[in-house]
Image (cartoon, grey):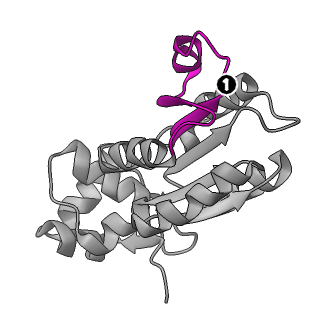
Amino acid sequence: MSEVHVLTTGEAARYCGVNFRTVIRWIERGQLKAYKLPGRGDHRICVEDFVSFLRDNAMPVPAELGAATRKVLLVSDSPEMIAGRQLLQQAGCDVDLASDSFSAGAMLASGKPAMLVLDSNLEGVNGFQVLDMLRSRSEFSSLSVVLVAPQDEDNQQRWLDAGADAVVAAGCDRAELVGRINLLLDA
């Protein structure tokens, strides 16, 4: 199975039902994020950016492109969290698993997930530092983050203030976690 990661202006135009010059104008005006190829200068649009543009402008997202935005990076070494991977896959998510911060960083950079599920109980990981780094870098601006907080965590609001999109307690029902993830991915 080949995955589409980038689109040409012509492909984007066909999805929108417009002329490719309209897509180029959107890019030139800064409404649609794209990059230029060296040499000829043709534009390429990352699928994630195109889907965000469609959603921001209340345009329908084609099913084959919507699936590309259901990629989840699960960062945990907890057996309960790892078992949740299967539930996410059954819910239509493409799930990558990292059990340490080094692997997570590499997968985050290369895999371009739509969501990061971060277990703050993972040894050697400071959840606040991770959130700060993610929110300070533009390439992760559209990344949703679900943080799995320690069970004894009293103040989940501080995680939300630090940049998490949702917080669940460690040991929560796996169905609750999957529900939260699906809710954010479909938003």
Q: Position of residue 31 (x, y in %)?
A: 29, 44
| Type of amino acid at the residue the image marks with label 1 | Asp
The answer to whether one can see residue 64 in this image is: yes
Question: Does residue 108 appear left or right of residue 32 in this picture?
Answer: right
Task: Pick whichever, 130 or 151, lies toward us.
Answer: 151
Q: Residue at x 51, y 37 (%)?
A: 141
**Which quadrant is the C terminus positioned in?**
top left
The stretch drawn in magenta includes residue 23: no
What secondary structure is marked by label 1? Answer: helix
Q: Position of residue 77 (x, y in %)?
A: 78, 50
The answer to whether one can see residue 112 in this image is: no
Q: Position of residue 150 (x, y in %)?
A: 68, 25
Taking the view exactly as shown, the residue that stands out farthest to the bottom is 1
Q: Which residues are magenta?
A: 144-173
Taking the view exactly as shown, the residue that stands out farthest to the right is 124
Q: Which residue corresponds to mark 1?
A: 132
Question: Does residue 31 appear left or right of residue 130 in this picture?
Answer: left
Quarter of the figure with residue 10: bottom left
Assess disc 1: are there few (<14), some (14-19) or many (≥20) residues with their C-alpha within 10 Å of its C-alpha. few
Q: Residue at x 64, y 16 (%)?
A: 153
